[in-house]
Amino acid sequence: MPNTTPRPPKTTTQKGLGWDHQLHRDRLLLRHVDGTLCWWCGRKMFREPTRNWDGKPLNAEHSKSRSLHGTTGNHADRLMHDTCNKQRGDGTRDDQRPALDPTRQAALDAHAETRDVLGDLVYFAWPP
């Protein structure tokens, strides 16, 4: 009879996502401009989790997957929605990402916010 005892989940450090990875994520977030499009889905990304379409914080993502290229010297180099990062997996399906589907892009553009990347700009009427 096989052992059905569940294994405890790996810690972030055991997955190669420890302090160094968190530092790279913080640096990516500092340089991030709200409204930048996600590489995977083509939707806008925001620092504030509630503004993202999946309601979750952005993930630091490796363009070279950790499973194929390891973690040594392979730093996270872009941000991605949490759900998109999980859908991408090890990167073997990158050619099937939703952002490449023109019909999906048209639907996203139709529902896009009317504000530009900077949001609503306020100006002051200075006295003459």
Image (cartoon, rainbow, N blue to C red):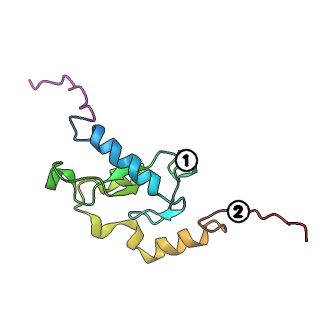
The range drawn in magenta is: 1-12
Quarter holding the N terminus is: top left
- Judged left or right of residue 96, residue 118 is right
* Residue to which mark 1 is pinned: 48
Residue toward you, 83 or 29: 29
Quarter holding the C terminus is: bottom right
Where residue 37 sits in the image (x, y, percent)?
47, 65
Numbered badge on residue 120: 2
Where residue 49 sits in the image (x, y, percent)?
52, 46
Three-letter residue code for mark 1: Glu
Residue toward you, 105 or 47: 47
Q: Is residue 108 above or below residue 53?
A: below
Secondary structure character of the magenta stretch overall: loop
Q: Residue furthest right?
A: 128
Q: SS at mark 2?
A: loop
- Of label 2 and label 1, which has the lower sequence position? 1
Q: SS at mark 1?
A: loop
